């Protein structure tokens, strides 16, 4: 598996010391799904959703994951949340491998990492009252009585800008933005060290999205929560995250502090993504337009994953896979010809 | 526009405004009709448990085939029994059959369906193949086979109908549950560390309940029909217990002498089944407008 | 310049469970040949209802008032049969979700050719040939193979290209694109928008582009309508509007967008409250309960459109103040 060589190269990126202060550490993570067999005589195909991802996220840090559909960002979220088992590699949360834990041990560890989902209309059970929805993570933990739980629910609802009395209402009585606040309250109630947010504001109207983004920021400042924030919206990621990783076909192709990444991207794919974002400014811009679309995840060729669409791809890119290497100041890119887009 | 049309709000218009369950129910005509007929059925059963004009089993050979009169509202049958009293009491039998057979089918079927949906894989295959197998037989044939094996009688008839209901509910609840399992709130429950059993009870079951309730009313109606058919064949309720189905079969030989003997139980069966079906269809519309068929 | 489509005080009233709702109120615009009119707003602002009203595809029980003129002919006054002849021929529409807008059981070529057979009375073979040409024109790679495939065999971006090919089959005078790229990735969005623009320039059709994304509108529209609560609150050339928003809602909406490159040092200005329910709009200005400048008079007076600059108007009673604060 090419992941082996890839992992060795990654020693370079762990210049930030591997300490158990890391809330989240992901090592050489792979996830492949089998496809249904199409023919008796041919081997069943596979979907290569994640192909060797390494990440580290410190306490109270915020890491944005951006990329287009099929880049593996949602698979990453599910693996980090322990909803699926990795094909290879491991996920450690607060220094503990979550795939190695079972039963009650894992259930109790789960208080440290919670998730906020995309769809504010689908992520809340329509037949439960808000109080019960928000308290759900507590039920599994045990060790608290109903009165304590009610108190915690009231407190956390107020923290996200709702009223304590809202616990007796049903989700359909709330607007999209308020529902997402309820989802945030549910994630917050166990005082987690990490919140994984998968497109958490994508379904909201702009005016409401800004409210939720500000809320997420304030909560991080108050409680020192770390965010793994997955989004296709670069502006949102830039607003919320210190560091950003760009994914393409199951790999991280660039990773850097948000400022550096958005000001001076090194990978041509990052550059193309940035260029493609429409900006609400007068006048039209000339820009680099990326041809083609993200290829299927079922094949694994040699060379750079982006070579097929890359305007500067050379013979080397098609034969040799570029490792994710450091370019100083915590800026990493997996490209044989990084940076310098002036020419 | 609507401002000018606004009239002093009567109680009814206040009740039917808005979009709550009862408001929508009160606006739904066929639901109201179905509810009325079903309520009538229940009322007949309840009243007859305490009072009937005459003892429904008491024969009076001097008064055979009496036409409707002030004493005997629907007349009497070939044994001189009061028809109105028999019809009233027959409702008990129908309700008993419906409630018990639906309860059997619902409890086992829903449990199997939920299990299949929660476990997927082999379990789901097994449950579904079992229902396919059961579906391969026509309902009445299955019941006849069952009763033939266990012997005729009301209890066995009810059991047979109940068993037939199991795959109906298993299939329905598995389909509905599978849809619920794909929702994000299930994912949220899993990230909270909840197991499959707990998720099934706390999230899946409450969310598929409306569909099951609707189906239950339809199966109730089908059970009444099936019991009538079994009794007609002599495999259901045994004499002298009043049963609409058996009344029909007894009336068969006398159809030219007094056709009303067949008309009354037939009407009772038809109206009950119609009422329950309207009720079920109405409930479906009211609970989830998206499921309703356009009419 | 030749006007192809004109709306004159278009009003749409919907029947909802909560009573009649004014989804669109007194909307007026004119669209010239080869120009792009952008309609921007949040959910429930009436932008999609406007499109459906023009297409004559409003839900049952909906009421319209005012006029929609296509080359001077009032579409709202036409009967169903006449409207059917115009839909898909003179006016075409593409939707947000390219998967559900295509019939999964029919081959691409048949679906693209359908409009030609229906409106141009073409034979099957002739329509198939034209469909091939259209697929090539909208940039479907390997069109000879794709034309015989089914929608599920195509990617989302390619499906949207097929939708565009279908819409263009009869060279319509007006193309309405309702959130055409919302379901697509940004790099694909760019390709699709560029394609639509090129085709509009080539054929000279008028384009109505509906989006919730101010960026998409800014980069593609010549003229812009900003809608809120069923009303146009600001209207003008794209240049003028994006140089200086005049209406407090448009200003707030712009301020609420996280701008690329602004990073964590800034804090987003938010609009308090939520998007209004059109069935439950207050009298007076629809934005009054979220507006930082609202005064008592806003609750009783529907603000008229006032001129704020060359070809730039906004509906607010306190425009001067609003601009002073901007």
Image (tube, coloured by chain):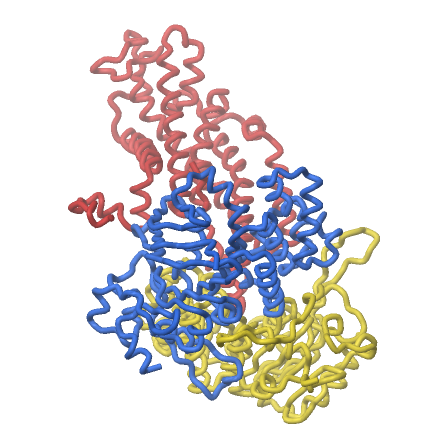
Chain colours: A yellow, B red, C blue
The correct choice, above or below, for C110 with respect to B95 in the image is below
Q: Is residue A107 visible?
A: no
Give percent across and percent down for residue A174: 36, 64
Question: Is residue C307 or residue A115 the one in the foreground?
Answer: C307
Count every numbered label the image shows and give the total.
Answer: 0
Who's the residue at 49% across and 24% down the image?
A: B230
For the point 81% across and 51% down, the residue is A40
Work out whether C231 lies above or below B127.
Answer: below
Residue A96 in view (yes/no) = yes
Residue B162: image location, x then y, percent? 50, 37
Question: From the viewer's perspective, is A245 left or right of C250?
Answer: right
Quadrant hosting residue A4: bottom right
Q: Return the residue nearer the eye: A218 or C318.
A: C318
- Front residue of this view, candidates A129 and B20: B20
Above or below for C29 versus C186: above
On the image, the x and y values in percent for residue B121 come to 65, 54
Q: Does residue A43 appear left or right of residue C14 in this picture?
A: right
The answer to which quarter of the image holds residue B63 is: top left
Which of the two residues, C108 or B89, is positioned nearer the viewer here? C108
Q: Residue furthest front?
A: C1
Residue A314: x, y in percent?
80, 78
């Amino acid at each position: 598996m090419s992941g082996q060589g890839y992992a060795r190269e990654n020693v370079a990126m762990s210049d930030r010391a591997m300490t158990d202060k890391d809330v989240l550490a992901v090592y050489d993570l792979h996830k492949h799904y089998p496809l249904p067999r199409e023919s008796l005589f041919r081997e069943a195909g596979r979907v290569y959703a994640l192909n060797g991802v390494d990440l580290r996220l410190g306490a109270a840090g915020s890491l944005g994951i951006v990329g287009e559909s099929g880049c593996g960002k949602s698979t990453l979220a599910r693996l980090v949340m322990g909803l699926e088992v990795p094909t290879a590699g491991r996920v450690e949360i607060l220094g503990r491998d979550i795939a190695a834990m079972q039963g009650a041990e894992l259930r109790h560890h789960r208080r440290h990492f919670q998730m906020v989902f995309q769809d504010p209309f689908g992520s809340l059970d329509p037949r439960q009252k808000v109080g019960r929805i928000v308290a759900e993570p507590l039920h599994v933990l045990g060790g608290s009585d109903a009165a304590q739980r009610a108190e915690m629910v009231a407190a956390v609802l107020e923290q996200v800008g709702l009223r304590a009395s809202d616990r007796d209402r049903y989700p359909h009585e709330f607007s999209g933005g308020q529902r997402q606040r309820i989802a945030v309250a549910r994630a917050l109630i166990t005082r987690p060290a990490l919140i994984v947010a998968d497109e958490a504001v994508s379904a909201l109207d702009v005016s409401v999205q800004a409210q939720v983004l500000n809320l997420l920021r304030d909560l991080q400042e108050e409680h020192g929560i770390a965010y793994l924030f997955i989004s296709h919206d670069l502006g949102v990621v830039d607003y919320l995250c210190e560091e950003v990783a760009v994914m393409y076909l199951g790999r991280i192709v660039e990773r850097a502090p948000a400022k550096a990444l958005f000001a001076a991207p090194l990978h041509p794919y990052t550059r193309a993504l940035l260029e493609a974002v429409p900006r609400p400014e007068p006048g039209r811009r000339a820009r680099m337009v990326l041809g083609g679309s993200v290829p299927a995840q079922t094949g694994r060729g040699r060379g750079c994953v982006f070579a097929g669409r890359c305007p500067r791809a050379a013979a080397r890119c098609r034969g040799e896979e570029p490792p994710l290497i450091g370019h100083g100041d915590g800026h990493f890119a997996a490209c044989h010809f990084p940076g310098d887009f002036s020419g | 526009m609507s401002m000018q049309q606004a009239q002093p709000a009567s109680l009814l218009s206040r009740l039917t405004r808005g979009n709550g369950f009862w408001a929508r129910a009160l606006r739904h005509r066929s639901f109201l009709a179905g509810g009325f007929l079903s309520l009538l059925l229940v009322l007949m059963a309840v009243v007859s448990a305490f009072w009937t004009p005459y003892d429904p089993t008491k024969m009076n050979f001097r008064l055979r085939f009496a036409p409707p009169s002030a004493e005997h509202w629907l007349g009497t049958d070939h044994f001189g029994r009061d028809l109105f009293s028999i019809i009233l009491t027959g409702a008990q039998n129908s309700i008993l059959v419906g409630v018990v057979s639906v309860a059997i089918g619902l409890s086992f079927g829903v449990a199997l369906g939920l299990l299949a949906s929660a476990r997927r894989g082999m379990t789901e295959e097994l449950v579904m193949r079992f229902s396919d197998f059961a579906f391969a037989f026509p309902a009445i044939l299955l019941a006849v086979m069952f009763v033939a094996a266990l012997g005729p009688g009301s209890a066995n008839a009810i059991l047979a109908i109940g068993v037939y209901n199991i795959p109906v509910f298993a299939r329905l609840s598995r389909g509905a549950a599978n849809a619920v399992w794909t929702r994000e709130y299930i994912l949220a429950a899993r990230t909270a560390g909840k197991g499959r059993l707990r998720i099934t009870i706390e999230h899946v079951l409450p969310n598929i309940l409306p569909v099951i309730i609707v189906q239950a009313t339809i199966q109730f109606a089908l059970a009444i029909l099936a019991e009538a058919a079994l009794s007609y064949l002599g495999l259901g309720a045994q004499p002298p217990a009043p049963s609409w189905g058996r009344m029909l079969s007894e009336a068969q030989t006398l159809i030219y002498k007094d056709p009303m003997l067949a008309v009354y139980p037939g009407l009772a069966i038809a109206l009950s089944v119609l009422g329950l079906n309207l009720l079920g269809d109405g409930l479906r519309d009211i609970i989830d407008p998206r499921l309703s068929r356009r009419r | 310049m030749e006007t192809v489509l004109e709306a004159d005080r278009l009003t749409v009233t919907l029947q909802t469970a909560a009573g009649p709702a004014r989804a669109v109120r007194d909307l007026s615009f004119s669209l010239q040949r080869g120009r792009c009119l952008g309609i921007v707003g949040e959910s429930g602002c009436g932008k999609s209802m406007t499109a459906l009203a023009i297409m004559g595809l409003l839900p049952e029980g909906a009421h319209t008032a005012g006029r929609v003129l296509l080359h001077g002919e009032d579409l709202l006054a036409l009967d169903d049969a006449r409207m059917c002849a115009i839909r898909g021929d003179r006016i075409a529409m593409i939707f947000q979700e390219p998967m559900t807008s295509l019939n999964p059981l029919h081959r691409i070529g048949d679906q693209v050719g359908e409009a030609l057979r229906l409106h141009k009375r073409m034979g099957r073979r002739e329509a198939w040939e034209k469909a091939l040409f259209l697929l090539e024109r909208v940039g479907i790679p390997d069109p000879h193979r794709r034309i015989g495939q089914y929608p599920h065999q195509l990617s989302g971006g390619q499906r949207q290209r097929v939708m565009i090919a279908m819409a263009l089959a009869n060279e319509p005078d007006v193309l309405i694109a309702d959130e055409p790229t919302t379901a697509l990735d940004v790099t694909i969005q760019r390709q699709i928008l560029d394609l639509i623009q090129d085709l509009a320039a080539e054929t000279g059709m008028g384009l109505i582009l509906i989006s919730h994304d101010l960026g998409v509108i800014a980069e593609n529209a010549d003229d812009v309508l900003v809608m809120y609560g069923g009303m146009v609150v600001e209207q003008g050339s794209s240049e003028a509007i994006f140089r200086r928003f005049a209406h407090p809602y448009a200003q707030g909406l712009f301020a609420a967008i996280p701008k690329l490159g602004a990073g964590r040092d800034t804090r987003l200005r938010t609009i308090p409250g939520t998007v209004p329910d059109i069935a439950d709009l207050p009298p007076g200005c629809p934005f009054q309960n979220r507006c930082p400048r609202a005064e008592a008079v806003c609750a009783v007076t529907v603000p008229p459109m006032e001129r704020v600059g060359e070809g730039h108007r906004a509906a607010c009673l306190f425009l001067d103040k609003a601009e002073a604060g901007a």
